[in-house]
Amino acid sequence: MAGVLGTHTVAQVGFIVKDVEASKRKWAAFLGMEVPPTQPIGDYAVTQTTFQGEPAPESYCWMAFFDVGPGALQIELIQPNEKPSTWRNFLEEHGEGMHHIAFQVQDSGRKVEAAQAHGLKLVQRGIYGDGSGEYNYLDAPELNCIIELLESYGK
């Protein structure tokens, strides 16, 4: 049984950090891996980020990714800027720590609707900085976490 999302395979675990440069060095040392590059989220003209249903052109973050498992499982580190976003809210409310569990899906619009019918609330979404896909963050209070749906276009 594949559940609400049609999959139960975790693609990514995301952490909110205060300093992505320091955090990625610590993770690299712990994992015995190379320090990955830092990536900006991208320009709003592409990302079209929304937060709580409203355009959020000033919401921004810097990210680093570690591919750590079979099936391209990733650890994502996210350093938010000071503007309102799910990342900033998490940092202010909880400090650094695990922010989300992500699942790779197809037809994310339908999957978001299914998750909302299951009681999850869409809190932020956007397009990847290179335009190749999208992310959707859903607050899942019954699961005590945020669920992220990732869709890579053309896959």
Image (spheres, grey):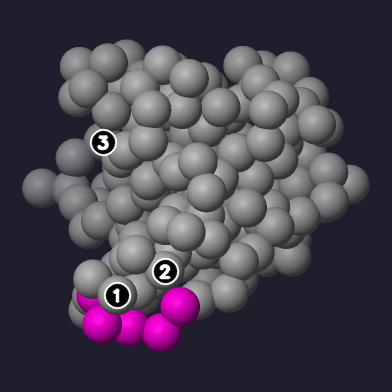
All told, the count of numbered labels is: 3
Residue that label 2 marks: 25
Residue 104 location (% of width, % of height):
39, 57
Residue 82, located in which quarter of the rendered image?
top right
Residue that label 3 marks: 4
Q: Which is more N-terminal, label 1 or label 3?
A: 3
Report the mark closest to the observer, 3 or 1: 1
Q: CA distance from mark 1 to mark 2?
A: 6 Å
Magenta extent: 31-35
Question: On the picture, is 79 further left or further right than 148?
Answer: right
Do labels 1 and 2 touch, CB within 8 Å? yes
Residue 9 location (% of width, % of height):
22, 58
Residue 33 among magenta residues: yes
Helix, strand or loop at mark 3: loop
Q: Is residue 136 above or below residue 129?
A: above
Amino acid type shown at disc 3: Val
Q: Please tell me which residue lies in front, 14 or 133.
A: 14
Residue that label 1 marks: 29
Residue 136 location (% of width, % of height):
52, 38
Amino acid type shown at disc 1: Ala
- Considering every residue shown, the one lying at the far left of the view is 1
Q: Please tell me which residue lies in front, 57 or 147.
A: 57
Dominant SS of magenta comes to loop
Q: Residue at x 35, y 22 (%)?
A: 94
Residue 58, located in which quarter of the rendered image?
top right
Q: Please tell me which residue lies in front, 139 or 23.
A: 23
Question: On the picture, is 74 further left or further right than 58?
Answer: left
Q: Residues within 10 Å of mark 1 (few under 14, many from 20)?
A: few
